[in-house]
Amino acid sequence: MTDDFDEFSFLPAQAADIAFDGPLPIGERLTLTLPDGRTLSALRWAPASDPEGLPLVTFLHGAGLNAHTWDTTILALGLPALAIDLPGHGDSSWRDDLRYVASALAPDVAAGIRAWTDRPQLLVGQSLGGLTAAAVAAAAGELVRELVVIDITPGIDPNGNAQQIAQFFAGPTDWASRDELVQRALQFGLGGTPAAAARGVYLNSRVRPDGRVEWKHHFAHLAAARAAATPAAPASAASGDTVATVLADNGWSDLGAVRVPLTLIRGDHGYVTDDEAADYVRRLPEATVVVVDSGHNVQEELPVELARMLAARGA
């Protein structure tokens, strides 16, 4: 068994899902070798009408996802864009130090933006990607002209709605087939339709030499290792610890240091509660908050609406 499918082969179906009938954008896989030898991977997208166009918008995905989560949003947006696989995710290297917090991820992301773009970006980050985007904007403000954070604040309760994804990834780390993973995603209410869930699983997993299928991202493997080391604790507790660690980073300090326009887009049934959103506004009175009819993964549930909101910001 091998991974012999084209990672861009799902695009026609995604275009059909949103009734997009124009020329499909051109996708390209990029790889950057970092100073310590690790690699950072990304997808660069250019409209068919401007195949050499350099990115105007850079996207950072959430924990346990990868750059392809933005495909349909980028398709609807119709502009040159960059979608980065965060370290430990997608085709980017795993971190030996296991530090998957915004302050550790931001320097790698900044290196990618410097290498692959030629102007300040509209930087869009969802969940862990949102916290990382804030860290980039705080430390390397010259790379960012506007910041959009999707369905995350440093103050969300790690024992709240975020536990759903923690429990999902706390299961086994390898499977007999991708079909098993698709069924698990659907049982947890993830992925939407069976077709969308299958697409997400294919782009977020790989086939090992022994034929078993495993998640590409490091989080599931870390959660399983922690659960094995503390068998008395529920498996979800290990993932919950990871969520808490991510949120305990420098998020509020980073957001307070941002000097460009800042928008929080949150799903009305996502991870950010009304009280947490109110706290966000109290701490960051200059920020704009937009509420949409969505769960946590706004880019997958409302890709066209999200693209319209980004286009309205001069993307």
Image (cartoon, rainbow, N blue to C red):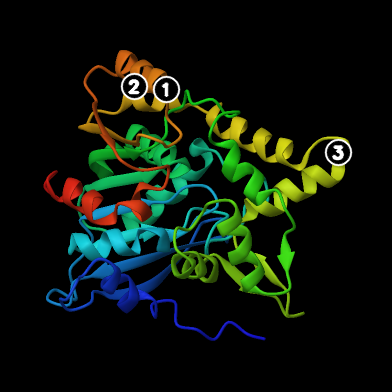
At 49% from the left and 26% from the top, the residue drawn is 156
Q: Alpha carbon of mark 3 to alpha carbon of mark 1: how far?
A: 31 Å
At 59% from the left and 68% from the top, the residue drawn is 205
Q: Type of residue at label 3? A: Thr
Q: Which residue is mark 2?
A: 256
Q: Which residue is mark 3?
A: 230
Question: Residue 250: where, in percent of width, then height?
Answer: 48, 26
Q: Type of residue at label 1? A: Trp
Pair 3/1: label in front: 3
In this rendering, the count of numbered labels is 3
Q: In the picture, which quadrant includes the N terminus?
A: bottom right
Q: Alpha carbon of mark 2 to alpha carbon of mark 3: how far?
A: 37 Å
Q: Earlier in the sequence, mark 2 or mark 3?
A: 3
Is there CB contact under 8 Å for labels 1 and 2? yes
Q: Type of residue at label 2? A: Gly
Rendered view: 151 above or below 123: above
At 36% from the left and 23% from the top, the residue drawn is 277
Is label 1 in a helix, a strand or a loop? Answer: helix
